Image (cartoon, rainbow, N blue to C red):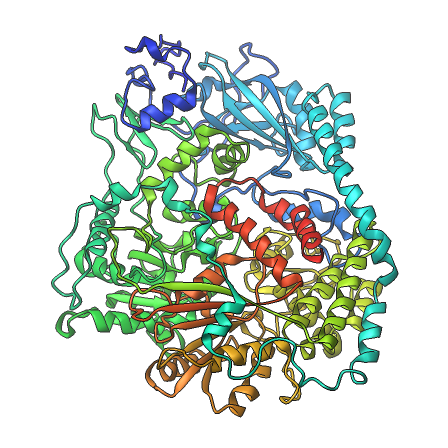
């Protein structure tokens, strides 16, 4: 890093006592610095500068020359911005394939950004251009300004002196100055139209009137838009040199893809949309009645024979993640231990006592003392100043530190009991305004588990007073601070959140200043635009904790949500700064960004794995196997018909003649026919045509059902919201057939009353259509002749009835389709297998009853479970066998589900079966999952951004799946 300026704003000499490091790269210097070498990054000049103070609005200056003082206007508030006040960097489409459900609607996709807080933002995989410029009007700035410091550029269209004004702020929100008028007049139209995103880094010391800055311009990589952008920038004399290399690389890739497309087109066009479905319907009840002649497994085969027909598969061998950027195993093993709290009835394991000591320490952080070279939450001391090593921002006063962190232990290592021990060991409020009460937010299905765990692990005479703030518990909304622990749901939190409230309410969740807030399954808030995420950040609390085995599910944006919730300071709590400092550099393979990520994870995250030697859980062995099943002849014909239809739909989409929703529909059928052909009947052929013909439909009961069916396809295909570019949270669909998170589209409606994709009018929230059942599970109830099972159901039954299984074997069978669970039930009844079931349609009390029966009744040997319910917050160690009936994009969700069985408390060897149809889309899904695991776990690098994942990569995945 470059040395900071002195109090006289003159660059001081860089001193080093190691001549051997001359010419050393910045990454190498930072690596030595993080390893404890204070000479790697020299200390800044110790002369203090005046404290930052509010400054008047600054008139943009055309040059560095002095100018008469301007009239003061109300002061700008300076400080950190948490919760809903964070500015977000939106992204545009990475290619020309629409995510919309109406053909042609992608041309208006940029309007989705109207929702986003902030003035700019484009495709995150965009091409960069650089301008060496300056910031003017800096004479009003009283803060520090360091070479290499990140600054934030914001448009000021209402500036009284210049409607093209571009304001420059430091990362804490204090105004530094403005971009000169001439340059601002060129950049402003591009920022307003979201065609360019502009970032800034200071490149020199601040002078009396200006400060040098490097502006980094990021524009779309979409070839359909890039050429027009290039022409406009050339006309405005803006840099376009970097376009050329990007264009050459893209032409090479397009040539390779075109060769593959031509080979596939010859065979696929003949089976374009509609023809395959007609053939299947004509043949469905005629030729293939003799379903009893199975070509795969036979009844009463031994377990050994099944094992011989399967292949070994361990998805966890692909790589290790968070721990590679946090503390190393040797350091974790040496961490200090805290004694078990006296009120705890269960003796903590050694690593759990280490976790307790770490959490107690993180709840009371302290800045490095004078003369120390330590780094605390990315802050280091430079004499009387404190500098953030991520953003290079300095301040003279002590920066606020986050109290809390992320407990990211593997599933089953006892994160729950560690939090209970923290509540017992550290109950004293940190601030006078705080209550004694801990708030735990959890999925509805696991709230009762928290209450039970607290009762089970504490002595009755010292047990915390617990309230479940749900249902009848809402009667206590005026008395929450009288309890030691309040357990509530993310839904209740979002419902009580009022983002525009001027003061805390008298009752409810937001009326209390909590001792601590704990987010169970904390990845729930990974979408920073969701109402639940904003609400969690707006809570008042002394300390904040996130519990999750998967702090990153899809992208580093997931981690940003955690940083914002924890209230880290120094700039990373701002999405645009987080993107500039971490996400974008990591995408480009910047080694310095990797070191910053390591420093960040080391300070906020504790991650231990089951297989670490010092954990010593003594868990029995777990074996994961893939059992490949052959199609019956009639199933193979149906599958082939859908596969050809899907190939035709893909070609039409790429030729801009078809719609994305049509392709999703056919691929969904393709996946369902792998389970049972009955799942594919009565789908939405008619409504698809009706919706695409009329664009917007009246909300009649028939059309609402059609829209719900279309929304269900989006949910089951694990599509993303077109506004936040993340998995749906409380999904809804509009009358123009576009699906969004409820929180995202409601904010759009508040501002413009138009669909952000097609600009159709949306009057109010009443026109939003929700899924038919909770959690977006399929509402269909499939029926089929139990005497004519599908190949996969036959395989299921063979696994469940195989001879030679361990006595008392209990099995959890996961499927993402509850209608498939309906088809399985008659076969279990035929064989006298007692079972229970849990899915999203059931009330939480009934779900608890099912789990209790499965756990405690010896003759109840099978639990049928929807993947969406069982992927979070359940303890299913009563089972020793797992069957995954179907797979799709997100492998992390499957891994979480398996870890509900293979976790602390599991006493028996465990087997996981993945049932895969041979030579089908399911086999190729395993390859897609491996790629995703490598992205999430092995490197932690954003080699493929979320927007690219949702469009270009998604289409490439479809091509892979269709063969």
Residue beneath the point at 43% across and 54% down: 550
Is 415 above or below relative to 71? below
Q: Judge whether residue 64 can be spotted in this image.
A: yes
Q: Where does the N terminus fall, quadrant-wise?
A: top left
User: Which residue occupies the foreground of this view, 305 or 81?
Assistant: 305
Q: Is 136 left or right of 172, judged from the image as shown? A: right
Quarter residue 370 falls in: top left
Residue 156 image position (x, y, % from top left): 60, 32
Quarter residue 101 falls in: bottom right
Residue beneath the point at 58% across and 43% down: 945
Residue 255 image position (x, y, % from top left): 78, 37
Q: Is 699 left or right of 69, judged from the image as shown? A: right
Q: Is 104 left or right of 559, judged from the image as shown? A: right
Q: Judge whether residue 51 can be spotted in this image.
A: no
Q: Is 166 left or right of 139, judged from the image as shown? A: right
Residue 643 image position (x, y, % from top left): 75, 63
Residue beneath the point at 43% across and 79% down: 847
Total count of labels = 0
User: Which residue occupies the foreground of this view, 416 or 528?
Assistant: 416
Q: Where does the C terminus fall, quadrant-wise?
A: bottom right
User: Which residue occupies the foreground of this view, 6 or 916?
Assistant: 916
Residue 597 image position (x, y, % from top left): 41, 37
């Amino acid at each position: 890093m470059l040395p900071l300026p002195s109090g006289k704003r003159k660059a001081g000499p860089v001193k080093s006592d190691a001549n051997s490091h001359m010419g050393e790269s910045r990454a190498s210097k930072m690596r030595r610095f993080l390893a404890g070498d204070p000479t790697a990054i020299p200390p800044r000049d110790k002369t203090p500068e005046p404290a930052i103070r509010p400054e008047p609005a600054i008139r943009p200056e055309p040059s560095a020359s002095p100018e008469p003082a301007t009239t003061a206007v109300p002061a700008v508030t300076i400080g950190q911005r948490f919760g809903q006040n964070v500015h977000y960097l939106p992204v545009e489409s990475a290619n020309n394939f629409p995510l919309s459900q109406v053909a042609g609607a992608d041309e208006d996709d940029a309007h989705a950004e109207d929702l986003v807080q902030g003035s700019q933002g484009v495709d995150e995989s965009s091409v960069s251009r650089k301008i060496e410029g300056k910031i003017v009007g800096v004479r009003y700035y009283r803060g520090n300004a360091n070479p290499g410091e990140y600054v934030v550029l914001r448009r000021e269209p209402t500036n009284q002196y210049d409607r093209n004004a571009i304001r420059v702020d430091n990362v804490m929100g204090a105004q530094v100055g403005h971009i000169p008028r001439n340059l601002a007049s060129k950049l402003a139209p591009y920022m307003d139209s979201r065609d360019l995103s502009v970032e800034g880094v200071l490149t020199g010391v601040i002078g009396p009137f200006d400060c040098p800055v490097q502006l980094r311009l990021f524009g779309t990589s979409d070839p359909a838009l890039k050429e027009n952008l290039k022409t406009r920038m050339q006309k405005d004399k803006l840099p376009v040199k970097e376009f050329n290399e990007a264009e050459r690389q893209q032409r090479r890739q397009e040539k390779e893809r075109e060769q593959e497309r031509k080979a596939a087109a010859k065979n696929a066009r003949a089976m374009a949309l509609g023809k395959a479905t007609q053939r299947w319907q004509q043949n469905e009840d005629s030729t293939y009645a003799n379903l009893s002649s199975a070509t795969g497994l036979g009844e009463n085969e031994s377990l050994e024979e099944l094992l011989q027909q399967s292949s070994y598969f361990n998805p966890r061998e692909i790589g290790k993640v968070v721990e590679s950027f946090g503390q190393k195993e040797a350091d974790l093993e040496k961490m200090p231990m805290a004694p078990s709290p006296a009120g705890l009835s269960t003796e903590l394991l050694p690593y759990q006592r280490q976790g307790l000591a770490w959490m107690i320490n993180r709840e009371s952080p302290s800045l490095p003392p004078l003369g120390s070279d330590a780094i605390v939450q990315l802050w280091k001391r430079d004499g009387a100043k404190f500098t953030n090593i991520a953003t290079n921002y300095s301040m003279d006063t002590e920066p606020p530190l986050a109290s809390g962190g992320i407990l990211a232990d593997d599933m089953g290592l006892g994160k729950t009991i560690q939090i209970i021990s923290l509540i017992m060991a550290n109950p004293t409020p940190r601030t006078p305004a705080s209550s004694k009460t801990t708030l735990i937010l959890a999925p509805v299905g696991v709230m009762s588990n928290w209450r039970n765990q607290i009762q089970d692990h504490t002595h009755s005479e010292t047990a915390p007073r617990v309230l479940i703030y749900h249902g009848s518990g809402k009667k206590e909304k005026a008395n929450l601070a009288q309890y030691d622990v309040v357990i509530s749901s993310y839904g209740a939190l979002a419902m009580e959140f009022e983002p525009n409230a001027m003061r805390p309410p008298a009752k409810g969740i937001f009326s209390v200043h909590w001792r601590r807030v704990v987010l169970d399954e904390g990845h729930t808030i990974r979408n920073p635009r969701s109402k639940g995420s904003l609400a969690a950040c707006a809570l008042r609390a002394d300390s904040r904790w996130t519990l999750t085995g998967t702090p990153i599910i899809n992208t580093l944006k997931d981690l940003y949500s955690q940083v914002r919730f924890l209230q880290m300071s120094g700039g990373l709590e701002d999405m645009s700064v987080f993107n500039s400092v971490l996400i974008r550099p990591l995408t480009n393979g910047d080694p310095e960004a990797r070191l910053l990520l390591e420093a960040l994870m080391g300070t906020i995250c504790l991650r231990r794995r089951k297989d670490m030697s010092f954990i010593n859980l003594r868990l029995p062995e777990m074996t994961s196997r893939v059992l490949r099943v052959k199609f019956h002849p009639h199933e193979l014909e149906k599958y082939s018909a859908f596969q050809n239809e899907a190939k035709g739909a893909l070609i039409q989409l790429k030729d801009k003649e078809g719609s994305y929703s049509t392709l999703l529909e056919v691929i969904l059928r393709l996946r369902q026919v792998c389970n049972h052909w009955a799942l594919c009947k009565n789908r939405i052929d008619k409504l698809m045509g009706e919706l695409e013909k009329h664009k917007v439909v009246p909300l009649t009961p028939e059309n609402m059902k059609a829209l719900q069916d279309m929304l269900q396809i989006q949910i089951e295909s694990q599509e993303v919201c077109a506004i936040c570019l993340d998995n749906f949270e409380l999904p809804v669909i509009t009358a123009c057939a576009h699906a969004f998170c409820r929180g995202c589209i409601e904010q759009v409606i508040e501002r413009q009353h138009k669909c952000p994709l097609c600009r159709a009018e949306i009057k109010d929230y009443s026109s939003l259509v929700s899924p038919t059942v909770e959690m977006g599970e399929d509402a269909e109830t499939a029926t089929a002749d139990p005497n004519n099972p599908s190949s996969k159901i036959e395989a299921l039954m063979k696994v469940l009835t195989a001879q030679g299984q361990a006595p008392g074997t209990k099995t959890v069978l996961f499927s993402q389709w509850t209608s498939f669970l309906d088809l399985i039930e008659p076969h279990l009844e035929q064989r006298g297998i007692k079972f229970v079931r849990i899915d999203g349609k059931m009330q939480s009390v009934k779900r608890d009853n099912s789990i209790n029966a499965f756990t405690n009744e010896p003759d109840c040997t099978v639990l049928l479970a929807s993947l969406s319910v069982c992927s979070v917050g359940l303890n299913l160690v009563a089972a020793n066998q797992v069957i995954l009936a179907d797979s799709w994009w997100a492998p992390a969700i499957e891994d979480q589900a398996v870890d509900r069985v293979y976790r602390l408390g599991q006493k028996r060897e465990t087997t996981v079966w993945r049932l895969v149809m041979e030579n089908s889309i399911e086999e190729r899904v395993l390859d897609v999952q491996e790629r995703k695991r490598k992205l999430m776990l092995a490197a932690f690098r954003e080699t493929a951004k979320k927007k690219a994942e949702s469009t270009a990569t998604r289409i490439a995945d479809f091509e892979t799946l269709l063969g």
